[in-house]
Amino acid sequence: MSANELRDTPGRLLLGWAVLFSALVVLAWRIHLHPADYEWTEYPTALGDTAFYTQLGPDDDRYEPNLKFTGQEKGLFRRVEGTVEMDDAVMFKIAKESSGRCFVYKPVTAGRDPEPPVYLKAADGRYVEFGLKKYYKPYAPPSR
């Protein structure tokens, strides 16, 4: 009985854990190497999205139409200087913009078509509006 033998319940449990953990490691490695082979759930709202908007192109988004969709030659302009506060749970993903860096969103009440205005997520609960027309600062008369 001095040899290394599996005895009683603890030895069998250890062997069972080793087999299960090895199978888990092999599965995780396989998923890491071939992620497209596995189906992943993607939620339709903005909850949990961390691909936040930063300036899309080399030019200012307010004066150059930098937001474009794949297969679309006409771009959209940034419509506001700051961000707009909206609930992440009611913002639905429409598509990815042409560079694929971030998702484009619309409120649930606006429908699912990519017609403007559309929004890019700048932070949790904060969005930047994009539309067809260029951005113009609101007129403020000069102070005397």
Image (spheres, rainbow, N blue to C red):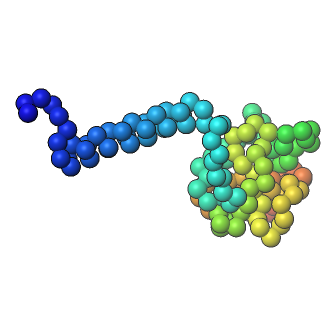
Q: Is residue 80 visible?
A: no
| Occupied quadrant, residue 14 | top left
Residue 114 appears in the picture as rendered: yes
Viewer-nearest residue: 58 or 36: 36
Specify the quadrant that holds the C terminus.
bottom right
Residue 125, percent from left and from top: 62, 62
| Residue depicted at x 43% and y 40% | 24
> In the picture, which quadrant includes the N terminus?
top left
At horizontal 32% and vertical 39% (from top left) the residue drawn is 18
Residue drawn 43% across and 38% down? 23
For this orientation, the residue located farthest to the right is 73
| Most distant residue in the left direction | 2
User: As rendered, which of 28 and 21 lies closer to the eye?
Assistant: 21
Q: Would residue 132 appear left or right of 10 to someone viewing this image?
A: right
Q: Nearer the viewer, residue 107 or 117?
A: 107
Residue 118 position by quadrant: bottom right
Question: Residue 3 vs residue 79: left or right?
Answer: left
Name the spot of residue 122 as percent of width and height, x first.
65, 52
Q: Position of residue 49 (x, y in %)?
A: 61, 52
Give 123 or 13, whichever is nearer the viewer.
13
Residue located at (80% from left, 70% from top): 109
